[in-house]
Image (cartoon, rainbow, N blue to C red):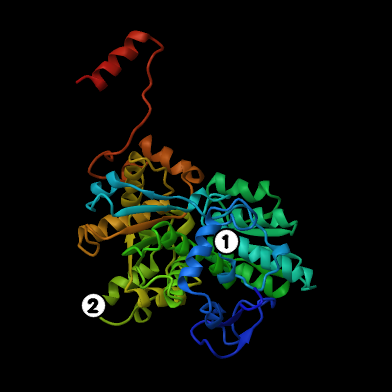
Amino acid sequence: MAEFSARYERFGAHGGAFWSLDEVIYRAPDGGLLDVVHDLEALATRSPESWRALFDARAGARTWPDRSGVWGKREWVLPSLDSEHILTLGEGNTQLLHLPKLARAIGLDAGSLHIKQCGQSHTGSFKDWGMTVLVSQVQQMRSKGVPIAAVGCASTGDTSAALSAYCALADIPSVVFLPADKISVAQLVQPIANGSLVLSLDTDFDGCMRIIREVVEALPIYLANSMNSLRIEGQKTVAIEIDQQLDWQVPDWVVVPGGNLGNVYALYKGFEMMRALGVTDRLPRLAVAQAEHASPLAQAFEKAQAGGSLRDHYAPVAAKKTLASAIQIGDPVSIERAFLALERTRGIALSASEGELIEACARGDRKGLFTCPHTGVALAVTEKLVARGDIAPEDRVVIVSTAHGLKFTESKVAYHTGLLDGLFPGGAPSSRNPPIGLPAEVGVVVDLLRKRFSA
């Protein structure tokens, strides 16, 4: 892949100063974010048909590293990475579910709704797509003598799980900064099990983020948060997978939960790269779904409808506790990236309340899913966009399900056992399904079943 190359440039100022991907750098000298920029002219020497055929062939491969959904597209990700440094846990190539019954339930045509199941990846979330790239690049940098003692992140749970797994695979030390008592037990145990140094701090995610940004300036610890644009390069392949699984057809809408907002830019970047190289011919519209308790982008978008730009109205917020804990972020690092993604795709940002998100989550489960609460946010926002006419019944919609529901069983148990009934002042939610206690007597059981299933 010597003919292909990529480098860091300042986000929003491509063509100016640039830096090697082997450098330890997270921001430009003026404080702006960085972007990984590829030599598109070199990539365009291969035809769109050739790229589609190559990626299709690798998607069904049994050989390493082609079977990875990320590294099967390695020319578009890290073309300068030596293959010996690729670290893969089989990330990507997850299911794109077709859900006609759920589509009809929310007002879409039967063939219109798909769920991209990112939670089927190794550590149970979309973070694997980005972390495989970042830790692989760190392994190469360390092999060249770059002084990196450990890799660290601030996390609401899923980032720490992915970081710890890939660092364990590479035998690279890792340290994670977690907000105390604000993540699920399933998320907490993952970095512990994989051997990370886990620091539980008495603050929220935004506080953890502020601390680690100072730590990486003082110590040779490499920052693994989405401020680091290497993560974006892996996550953008989710967009490529979506189009590939739709036979290289672009959906009309892609709805994605929004926390630190790197993911919405990653999706835009993947869709735009395909369009720029002629692999597809257009961009989808992107919708960012935020929990109402942590919705700075959605609040700014609502205000901007009355006049002015998103930037004019945007302000960080103090995030409040939400069932969608992984997106409980009030000061997202990638806000500028999200602005660009929404501007270029005629995108929308909208929020869902706690009651709306957990009820949408439960309705999705009753149609065969097992969703995380963040996917519940995206489902609820999709329902709102359909109800108000932004999304037409015939529009093809893809909802990005960011994590596996097994990581968030506490919220499901609370919903079905009535602990969340206070979120529904009109009465118990319609999808609640508590277990029924009965004596161990056949007659009692038969009577109940006869009443439940009689014609």
Q: Which badge, 2 or 1, comes first in the chain's sequence?
A: 1
Secondary structure at badge 2 equals loop
Q: Is residue 14 left or right of residue 379?
A: right
Residue 410 visible in the displayed image: yes
The residue sitting at 66% across, 48% down in the picture is 192
Secondary structure category for the residue under label 1: helix
Q: Residues within 10 Å of mark 1 (few under 14, many from 20)?
A: many
Give the foreground label among 2 and 1: 1
Pick the quarter of the image with the C terminus.
top left
Which of 395 and 168 lies nearest the eye of the viewer?
395
- Give the residue at mark 2: 306
Image point (58%, 64%), residue name: 208
Label 2 CA crowd tier, 10 Å (few <14, some 14–19, many 20+): few
The answer to whether the residues at label 2 and label 1 have Cβ atoms under 8 Å apart is no
Query: Relative to the observer, which residue lies in front, 181 or 53?
Result: 53
Q: How many marks?
A: 2
Q: For this view, does 312 lie left or right of residue 327?
A: left
Residue at 38% x, 52% y: name it.
115
Q: Position of residue 318 (x, y in %)?
A: 44, 66
| Residue 244 spot, x, y in % from top left | 44, 60
Which x, y percent locates residue 162?
60, 55
Q: Which mark is residue 56?
A: none
Task: Specify the quadrant of the image occupied by residue 158.
Answer: bottom right
Residue labelled with disc 1: 72
Relative to 31, say whether 154 is above or below. Answer: above
- Amino acid type, residue under disc 1 in the picture: Gly
Can the viewer see residue 228 in this picture?
no
Image coordinates of residue 183 in percent, x first then y, are: 53, 51
Q: Quadrant of the N terminus?
A: bottom right
What amino acid type is highlighted by mark number 2?
Ala
Left or right side of 279 for 43 = right
- Label 2 to label 1: alpha-carbon separation: 45 Å
